[in-house]
Amino acid sequence: MAKIVLVTGGSRSGKSRYALKLAESLGGRRAFVATCPVVDDELRERVGRHRRERASRQWETIEEPVDLAGVLSARGDWDVVLVDCLTLWVNNLMYEAERRGEGIDEDAVAGLTSGVLAACRRRRGVVVFVTNEVGMGVVPENASARKYRDLVGRCNQAVAAEADVVTLVTGGIPLALKEKRGEEGT
């Protein structure tokens, strides 16, 4: 069973940088699972820059906006998998459901998150998830934004409950919220 690490924080808090450094410190074969869909030229340039930076540091990048459980189940030869990020994953789930003319609710997101966690339990190594902490701000002013906040919150709670380590990053400073000691002392 893979060790599960959740790194959370606000936008531009340093959580992705922290997660990358953590994953690189673990050694072994690494995969970066990017959930961000490329929707414009600025994002295309940003994604390309990040991809080149990771490639120079021996990361394999997999772009998968929706099927995280499939990616985590499909290949077992990575020692470390970094998923960045769950927040965009939930956004993509909402988008795909709306595109099909369907809805998605907290129970559906909980079920999909459970599938992702089950895939982690079938892996070896470490899986690091990055997510935004969306529940610390004001209540969103429209129904769609409130639904998004609620779905991300449900996903984050489910992953945090199963995680061996949960770290909050703010201002680039990590704060340990949860840490289980395993057989290997990690």
Image (cartoon, grey):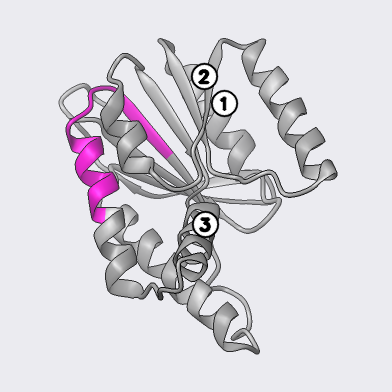
Q: CA distance from mark 2 to mark 1?
A: 5 Å
The answer to whether residue 161 of the structure is visible from this angle is: no
Q: Is residue 122 left or right of residue 63?
A: left
Q: Nearer the viewer, mark 3 or mark 2?
A: 3
Q: Which residue is mark 1?
A: 21
Quadrant for residue 15, please give it.
top right
Q: Which residue is mark 2?
A: 24
Q: Amino acid at mark 3?
A: Asn
Q: Which residue is mark 3?
A: 92
Residue at 27 percent across and 72 percent down: it is 107
Residue 131: say if magenta. Answer: no
Mark 3, secondary structure of its residue: helix
Are the residues tagged 2 and 1 within 8 Å (C-beta)?
Answer: yes
- Picture coordinates of residue 178 (x, y %)? 34, 50
Q: Quadrant of the C terminus?
A: top left
Residue at 29 percent across and 56 percent down: it is 112
Q: Amino acid at mark 2?
A: Glu
| Residue 177 position (above or below residue 106) | above
Mark 2, secondary structure of its residue: helix
- Residue nearest the observer in this picture, 61 or 130: 61
Residue at 31 percent across and 41 percent down: it is 69
| Residue 183 position (above or below residue 128) | above
Residue farthest front in this picture: 100
Q: Earlier in the sequence, mark 3 or mark 2?
A: 2
